[in-house]
Image: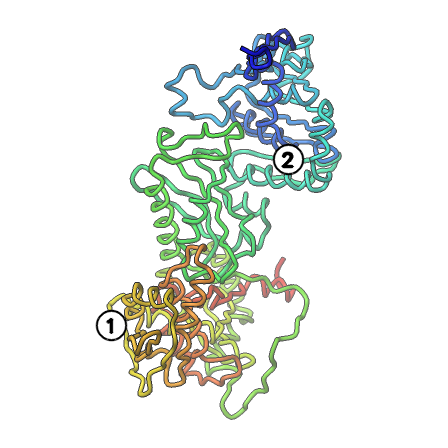
Amino acid sequence: MRTNARRCVQILEEDGVIIMGEIFEMPQRLREKIAAGEVITAPVSVVKELIENSMDAGADEIKAYFENGGKRLIRIMDNGKGMEREDLEICGKRFTTSKIHNERELEEIHTLGFRGEALASITTVSELTIQTRRAGTAKGYASEFHDDGRAIEIRESPITKGTIVEVRNLFGKFPVRLKFLKSDEIEASKITSLVTKYSLANPEMAFQLYKDGKEIFNSPKVDGQGKIFHAFGQEIAENVVKLDYESNGVAVSGYISKVGYSRKTRDYQVIFINGRLVKSSAITDAVEKGYADKIFLGRHPIAVLHITLDPEMIDVNIHPSKEEIKFKSEYAIVDTVINAVQKCIAQSSHAIEVEAGGKMARPAHKYEIDRGIQKALTDDMDELAEMITPKAKGQQDSQKLVQKTLGDKTKTTVPGDEFLHVNVMGQLNRTYILGYDDRSLILIDQHAAQERVFYERFTKQLKNKAIVVNRLLKPFVFSANREEEKFIEQNKGAFERYGFFVEQFSRGEYALTAIPALFGRAYDAGVIKDIIDELHENIDSGTTVSDELDHKIATKACRKAIKGGDILSIPEMKSLLTTLAECRNPYTCPHGRPTMLRMSWGDLEKKFKRSD
């Protein structure tokens, strides 16, 4: 055998480990650095791990400080149960934990942390100091830590309660990793977003956040809607409704937005599962499915949801970050969330609350008043005047009414009934129906309202398999290639359910012979070709024929509805509100725009300086 054909074995020694051949066991320190890189990827990772430790320790007050986007300093202070001296001595070592004791407990995790990797990873990539005092003990203790997790020197500390964790010079030992961090402002925004979301976890928990020595966020102990106010602001807090639902061992609670209120981003969707902040596309998709045809295209509902279920139904041990989860029965949980959202929507009033304020913006279109048809006010003028400007002897009773209604904005009877109680006064700018009730001044978009009426009239026919169609005197003939022919044949049933009848005319040609009556006489027969083209263009998006047909029907309802500029009489306005009240979802048009806005008497009185 030739010498150069022999398998040569090279023996190396590195960090005390013998390496033979190409495959070898990694040195312990290298393994720890790799593991730390999976847990701690940025300053926000440190904040997340430490906040979860504080919450596991039973803290109800948590203060977070950071400097230079968390690169120079992160400090988390809590009033939790703290640690004993012996706990402090070993808490920085890998796989030390107070959370789980055996494999069985791993299958039913009740705490946010459990892997025993967070503090060990932090010591590897930064300079760590901990001060702590166990509740009920006489002394507190403090120590810095080596990068291998060993406590350097334990000494007494003046801390009175809980734990203070300081992390300095993050990734100072890893200049390459430091270079991959974003700017201080971007890293700071990630920390702020995380703390803001965790502040929604528990009404009985207070959070404060300080950036470079200045307080930038404060969420005291308040109820759930109050938490949303401090996290997302007054506008969002006023336009959410409470959700509470349970089915098949899964409980869903929290707040979701009124159907007419939405945002351009999903940043206001916060999901907790068994108290853990998680990212779950399955859950957020379920929330949005619950709003089907109620949210404007490209916009998203608000959702702060707490989902509680048997820990054995989920697996949180997917990744060291513990943000990703797997469900043992995803369909059942998703179905529960969809039902929870739909039930909440069906049982709540969704009129959007607005505050009288802001800049005076010009309308998109200005219409002249037709004095022969369009009335400014109805014969109910005296009643309205008495409500807004009560007589002296009745002023006190009226004020009590205002306080009572403002004290319970969400109180209503059957959703939709409020449209029946609107006292119609007239038309504003030939676009809005102006009215009032005992709670507020009301504006209703006449176009959006009739869009909803037309759309639900059609969908009711669809559900009852009784679509009214118009037969075309002259069929619309169009060409189709082989792929399109196959698509048409596969989906003929779906087209016919919606009132579109398509027949093969000749080889490579089809004829549209009937369309939904909603389309009227002035129809656009090319709608079939549009649907085919759009579905082929978005073949990977998951869009179905029914989705595309729904969109076309909604668009047609929009075009057929009353427009801005159309003059309505008082009886016509009242008739429109009566039919709107009968709709399944009277609060938005099919594209998700709101139909009704309210301006409370309290807001009006504030603007007129009649109350504080």
- Name the residue that disc number 1 marks: 466
Q: Residue at position x 65%, y 12% from top?
A: 141
Of the image marks 2 and 1, the number of the one nearer the N terminus: 2
Determine whether 276 is above or below 544 in the image: above
Q: Residue 356 or 196: which is nearer the viewer? A: 196
Find disc 2 in the rendering and name its residue. Answer: 208
For residue 450, say whether it is visible: no
Residues at marks 2 and 1, CA–CA distance in whole angstroms: 59 Å
Frontmost residue, 343 versus 465: 465
Q: Identify which residue is drawn at 52% across, 16% down.
A: 95
The three-letter amino acid code for the residue at tag 2 is Gln
Left or right, 486 with respect to 283, comes to left
- Displayed quadrant of residue 104: top left
Q: Residues within 10 Å of mark 1 (few under 14, many from 20)?
A: some
Q: Which amino acid type is marked by label 1? A: Ala
Residue 176, x across and y down, in percent: 72, 29
Is 491 positioned to the left or the right of 165 in the image? left
Q: Nearer the viewer, mark 2 or mark 1?
A: 1
Q: How is the image coloured?
A: rainbow
Q: Position of residue 443 (x, y in %)?
A: 51, 71
For residue 442, above or below residue 84: below
Circle 2 Cα neighbour tier, 10 Å, few/some/many (<14 / 14–19 / ≥20): some
Residue 598 lies, with reference to residue 51, above or below; the image says below
Q: Is residue 538 above or below residue 73?
A: below
Please identify the residue farthest to the left as the structure is shown: 465
Quadrant in which the C terminus is drawn: bottom right
SS at badge 1: loop
Q: Is residue 427 visible?
A: yes
Q: Depth check: give the residue in front, 565 or 205.
A: 565
Which of the numbered marks, if any, corresponds to residue 570? none
